[in-house]
Amino acid sequence: MSTHKPISLQVIFRHLDVSPALEAKVREKIDKLGQFYPSIESCRVVIEQLHKHHQRGKHFRVLIDLKVPGQELVAGREPDQNPAYTDVYVALRDAFRAMRRQLEDLVHRQQGHTKHHEEKPHGHITEISPDKTFGRIESTEGRWLYFHRNSLVGDDLDKLQLGTPVYFVEDVGEQGPQASSVSPVGKHHILV
């Protein structure tokens, strides 16, 4: 029996019929996240069937928007990442796995589990979107990684500039390699 408070959940189906079985699977997965992280305030899951003429079969996109005290976490899976996303349950599973990793990172930061920066990948900011919602980092190895403003630790994207050196944790996101737990060098020394 679950001991965490009920999580406000919204499941949105786009371009496909509402599926009670799929909605039940979403509720099961969010309940597991709630057992791991009881402070989840709300969750919005969008399950979208995409129509792409150059591909065979129906492909699915799953986006998860999770609110916890003081933060909003976003995770998702796009069909281009995995041909298995013709199975909505595989896309759903992978999106929830990505969200679980973000929650685990958050728990480590909150509990003060730290490692030295020397062990962290680093690079510098090479792009910030005009609406200040995302950007790109070039790693010291010359690779480009996407990051979302919610990936920043203790800083606002409005305060960062092109060229700002940063530490980050690399993950796989909906746009390929992605940086999470992004922290400007010299400002924050707590990263997971």
Image (cartoon, rainbow, N blue to C red):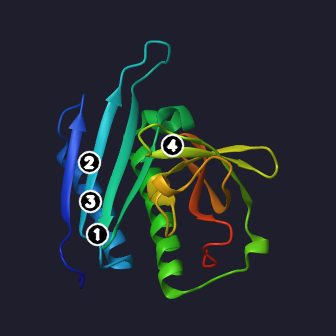
Taking the spot 58% from the left edge, 61% from the top edge, the residue there is 182
Local packing at callout 1 (Cα closer than 10 Å; few below 14, some 14-19, many 20+) is: some
For label 1, the SS is: helix
Question: What type is the residue that disc 2 sits on?
Answer: Leu
Give how far apart the Cα atoms at labels 4 and 1 are.
Answer: 23 Å
Taking the spot 49% from the left edge, 39% from the top edge, the residue there is 129
Residues at circles 1 and 3 in contact by the CB criterion of under 8 Å: no
The residue to which callout 2 is attached is 22
The residue to which callout 3 is attached is 43
Circle on res. 119: none
Eye-nearest disc, 3 or 2: 3
Residues at circles 2 and 1 in contact by the CB criterion of under 8 Å: no
Question: What type is the residue that disc 4 sits on?
Answer: Glu
Side (left or right) of 152 relative to 164: left
Judging depth in this view, the residue of 153 and 86 nearest the camera is 153
The residue to which callout 1 is attached is 31
Q: Please identify the quadrant where the C terminus is shown.
A: bottom right
Local packing at callout 3 (Cα closer than 10 Å; few below 14, some 14-19, many 20+) is: some
Residue 137: image location, x then y, percent: 65, 48
Residues at circles 4 and 3 in contact by the CB criterion of under 8 Å: no
Question: What type is the residue that disc 3 sits on?
Answer: Cys
Side (left or right) of 34 relative to 121: left
Give how far apart the Cα atoms at labels 4 and 3 are.
Answer: 18 Å
Of labels 4 and 3, earlier in sequence is 3
Local packing at callout 4 (Cα closer than 10 Å; few below 14, some 14-19, many 20+) is: many
Eye-nearest disc, 1 or 3: 3
For label 2, the SS is: helix
The residue to which callout 4 is attached is 174
* Location of residue 154 with respect to 23 vertically, above or below: below
Residue 101: image location, x then y, percent: 51, 65
Q: Is residue 30 visible?
A: yes
Give how far apart the Cα atoms at labels 4 and 2 are.
Answer: 21 Å
